[in-house]
Image (spheres, rainbow, N blue to C red):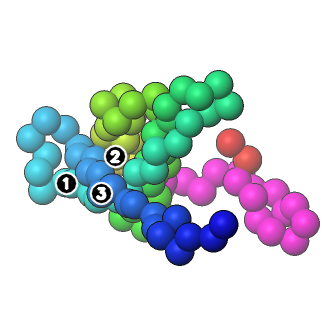
């Protein structure tokens, strides 16, 4: 039986910030909640920071928030995205080797 209401997708807005008092360095994105193969909850987060994205996965939104906050600090204060790193051409696409 088909029900059009089942096509509804909920999106939660999530925030990552650099430092405890970094309200001027806040970035917003989305989180998605799923369950793994064993039925355990998993939360995925994707936030745009400057010209790139940070993506993380955790068992709950609190751990996810800590991971995303740390990645924002690494990008803004330690230049995580400043070096493209080593790439290799695979099937006609440039792929980052990390």
Furthest residue in direction front, as rendered: 1
Q: Are marks 3 and 2 in contact (CB under 8 Å)?
A: no
| Residue closest to the eye, 26 or 94 | 26
Q: Are marks 1 and 2 in contact (CB under 8 Å)?
A: yes
- Residue 19 position within the rendered picture, expressed as x and y whole percent measured from the top left: 19, 38
Furthest residue in direction bottom, as rendered: 4
- For disc 3, the neighbor class at 10 Å (few under 14, some 14 to 19, many from 20) is few
- Residue 96 position within the rendered picture, expressed as x and y whole percent measured from the top left: 70, 54
- For disc 1, the neighbor class at 10 Å (few under 14, some 14 to 19, many from 20) is some
Task: Give the number of the disc on residue 72.
Answer: 2
| Quadrant in the picture for the C terminus | top right
Q: Is residue 11 left or right of residue 44?
A: left
Of the numbered discs 1 and 2, the one sitting upstream in the chain is 1
- Confirm whether residue 56 shows in the render: no
Q: Residue at x 59, y 28 (%)?
A: 39
Within the image, what quadrant is residue 62 found in? Answer: top left
Q: Secondary structure at mark 2?
A: helix
Q: Which residues are magenta?
A: 80-96
Is 42 above or below relative to 5? above
Task: Give the number of the disc on residue 25.
Answer: 1
Task: Give the number of the disc on residue 13.
Answer: 3
- Residue 31 position within the rendered picture, expressed as x and y whole percent measured from the top left: 40, 51
């Amino acid at each position: 039986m088909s029900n059009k209401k089942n096509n509804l997708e909920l999106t939660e807005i999530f925030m990552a910030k650099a430092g405890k008092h970094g309200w001027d360095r806040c970035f917003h994105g989305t989180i998605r909640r799923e369950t793994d193969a064993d039925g355990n909850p998993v939360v995925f987060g994707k936030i745009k920071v400057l010209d790139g994205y940070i993506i993380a996965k955790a068992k709950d939104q609190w751990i996810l928030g800590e991971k995303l906050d740390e990645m924002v600090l690494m990008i803004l204060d330690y230049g995580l995205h400043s070096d493209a790193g080593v790439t290799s051409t695979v099937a006609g696409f440039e792929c980052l080797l990390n």
